[in-house]
Image (tube, rainbow, N blue to C red):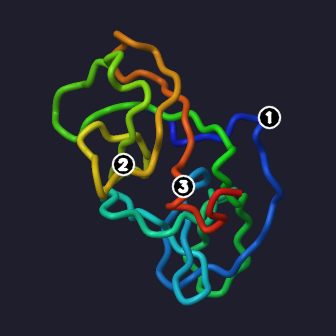
Amino acid sequence: MAILTIRPADHGPLLSGIEAAGQSWDAGMLLTFSSGKLAALIAKGASSNAPATIVGIANAPSTGVTDTIAPYTPITSTMLFEATLENSDADPYTMLQADIGAEYGITVTAAGIAYVDKYKTAGDACFHIVEGEVGTVQARVRGYFSADTLLTKGS
């Protein structure tokens, strides 16, 4: 399934930062700051836990070279995103009506594919679902990141 993507109408400004050491992210992945440098928010093969501050979304893959310029789009709470709703067990998840309005966390597969994870709730939650294909397996959902998880805090 697809990596989190910004709808074209929601694109923000393109900024650049400095890549932290030892990074491995793909275009479309969530970024945070680590000692003032850009780093993957969630490493490949990991899931979100008590989300760190989300800075933006990568516009290009990391180079793996420390201090390289890295382009990104900052995320605000008014930007809509599209992602796949799934769960972190082996069975594909079918979206329920109750998922509309719910808030879940993000998991990233070892291949670098990010998805909204039905099983990541409470302290792990950062993505608020506002629309989706109820009754669909691995449904595409639209939503936004909670303002309290963003560097821009409610912008």
Mark pair 1, 2: CA separation: 24 Å
Looking at marks 1 and 2 on the same chain, the residue that comes earlier in the sequence is marked by 1
Side of 54 relative to 138 (left or right)? right
Closer to the chain start, of discs 3 and 1, is 1
Answer with mark 3 or mark 2, whichever residue precedes in sequence: 3
Q: List the single residue furthest toward the top.
A: 135
To which quarter of the image does residue 153 belong? Answer: bottom right
Secondary structure category for the residue under label 1: helix
Residue 105 is labelled as: 2
Nearest to the eye among marks 3 and 1: give it. 1
Q: Given the image, on which type of amino acid does mark 2 rest? A: Gly
Residue 102's disc is none
Q: Is mark 3 on a helix, strand or loop?
A: loop
Mark nearest the camera among 3 and 2 is 2
Q: Do the residues labelled 3 and 2 touch (CB within 8 Å)?
A: no
Other residues around mark 1 within 10 Å, as few (<14) / some (14–19) / many (≥20): few
Instruction: Give the secondary structure at mark 2.
Output: strand
Q: Where is residue 29 in the image (x, y as percent from the top left)?
A: 54, 55
Residue 29, disc: 3
50 is higher (above) or lower (below) than 98: below
- Which residue type does callout 1 highlight? Ala
